[in-house]
Image (tube, grey):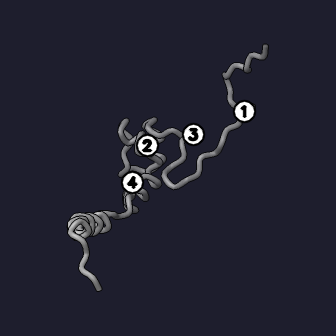
């Protein structure tokens, strides 16, 4: 086996540690943890409504009574119901020319 050229060894000195750091630094990115998600579901809050004063330590009913939840917004972990253009109220019909 012949010795590697000088350029190849220099490249390995830089590339291999960089790849090792990259592999170690990669971790799954989770927006919220499980405990926080459960608190959001229980309270009926979303991350946005929490910023507007919704209390994740209260129940859905308590937050709804205070007017802090939006019933049309799904809680964390729930699927949003798609609304077709036929069911939207107060929208103008498209203009055809």
| x, y percent for residue 41 | 47, 54
Relative to residue 17, is residue 54 drawn left or right?
right
Instruction: Choose between 33 and 17: the one closer to the eye.
Output: 17
Relative to residue 55, is residue 90 drawn left or right?
right
Q: Secondary structure at mark 3?
A: loop
The numbered mark at residue 31 is 4
Which is closer to the viewer, label 1 or label 2?
1
Task: Check the picture and name the quadrant holding the C terminus.
Answer: top right
Q: Is residue 80 above or below residue 27?
A: above
Instruction: Choose between 38 and 94: the one closer to the eye.
Output: 94
Q: Residue at x 38, y 42 (%)?
A: 50
Q: Residue at x 40, y 62 (%)?
A: 34
The numbered mark at residue 72 is 3
| Earlier residue among tags 3 and 2 | 2
The numbered mark at residue 32 is none
Query: Label 4, label 3: how many angstroms apart (C-alpha)?
Result: 22 Å
Q: Is residue 8 above or below residue 60?
A: below
Where is mark 1, residue-wise?
87
Which is closer to the viewer, label 4 or label 1?
4
Which is closer to the viewer, label 4 or label 3?
4
Direction bottom: furthest residue: 1
Q: Is residue 34 above or below residue 54?
A: below
Direction right: furthest residue: 97
Task: Check the picture and name the quadrant holding the N terminus.
Answer: bottom left
Instruction: Choose between 61 and 92: the one closer to the eye.
Output: 92
The numbered mark at residue 63 is 2
Query: Label 4, label 1: how many angstroms apart (C-alpha)?
Result: 32 Å
Which is closer to the viewer, label 3 or label 2?
3
Which is closer to the viewer, label 1 or label 3?
1
| x, y percent for residue 21 | 25, 65
């Amino acid at each position: 086996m012949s010795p590697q050229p000088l350029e190849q060894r220099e490249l390995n000195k830089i590339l291999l540690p960089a790849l090792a750091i990259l592999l170690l630094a990669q971790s799954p990115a989770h927006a919220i943890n499980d405990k926080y998600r459960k608190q959001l579901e229980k309270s009926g809050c979303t991350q946005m409504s929490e910023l507007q004063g919704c209390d994740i330590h209260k129940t859905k009913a308590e937050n709804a009574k205070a007017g802090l939840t939006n019933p049309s917004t799904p809680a964390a972990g729930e699927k949003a119901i798609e609304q077709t253009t036929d069911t939207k109220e107060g929208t103008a019909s498209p203009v055809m020319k």
